[in-house]
Image (cartoon, helix red, strand yellow):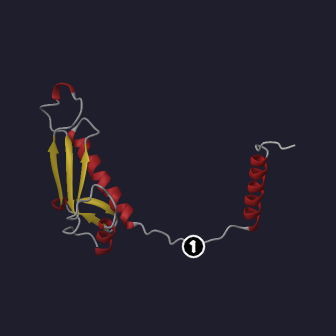
Amino acid sequence: MLYISNNLSIPEQEIELNFIRSQGAGGQNVNKVASAVHLRFDIRASSLPEHVKQRLLVLHDQRLSKEGVLIIKAQQRRGQEKNREDALFRLKELIIQALQEQKKRRPTRPGRSARKKRLETKKQHGQLKSQRKKVRF
């Protein structure tokens, strides 16, 4: 069971973990030990609440396939168990991010002093540029 929050968790049956060989340099064990982890999580078939599923599906994330399967590859650590924990942690963080509601932006206008400062800066910049011109007699 992967616990996301007090009232939200994911059963382990919904998370598919495949252990594969890691890429890159690895010394003696590179061709023997499958320490990297491919985590596959089908968002549409999961037991998550519907609003969380929708938020996860609209994320523009390269790890999300067209079928709604989230694929996380963890191979940073040397050990299989550490990579497994890392993949589960990254899945948990992604779901927590989808749970948080984005605040609606209130449109604002710049204040009087900000407008005045902007115009002063423009005047100074214009004067600097005018000093670069050729001098005419």
Pick out the residue farthest to the left. 32
Place of residue 62 in the rendered image (x, y in percent of width and height, measured from the top left)? 30, 55
Judging depth in this view, the residue of 137 and 17 nearest the camera is 137
Q: Is residue 32 left or right of residue 70?
A: left
Quarter of the image containing the N terminus? bottom left
On screen, residue 74 above or below 14: above
Q: Which amino acid does the dot numbered 1 rest on?
A: Arg
Place of residue 40 in the rendered image (x, y in percent of width and height, measured from the top left)? 20, 56
Pick out the residue farthest to the right. 137
On screen, residue 25 above or below 81: above
Q: Which residue is drawn at 20% across and 25% down?
A: 27
* Label 1: element kind: loop
Task: Please tell me how many numbered marks the rendered image carries.
Answer: 1
Place residue 121 in its image quadrant. Answer: bottom right
Q: Which residue is drawn at 17% across and 51% down?
A: 17
Q: In this view, does 19 lie to the left or right of 83?
A: left
Label 1 neighbourhood size at 10 Å, few (<14), some (14-19), many (20+)? few
Disc 1 target residue: 106
Q: Residue at x 73, y 59 (%)?
A: 118
Q: Which residue is drawn at 21% across and 52% down?
A: 39
Quarter of the image containing the C terminus? top right
Pick out the residue farthest to the top. 28
Judging depth in this view, the residue of 136 and 52 nearest the camera is 136
Judging depth in this view, the residue of 133 and 123 nearest the camera is 133
On screen, residue 63 above or below 30: below
On screen, residue 118 above or below 76: below
Place residue 5 in its image quadrant. Answer: bottom left
Place of residue 79 in the rendered image (x, y in percent of width and height, measured from the top left)? 23, 37
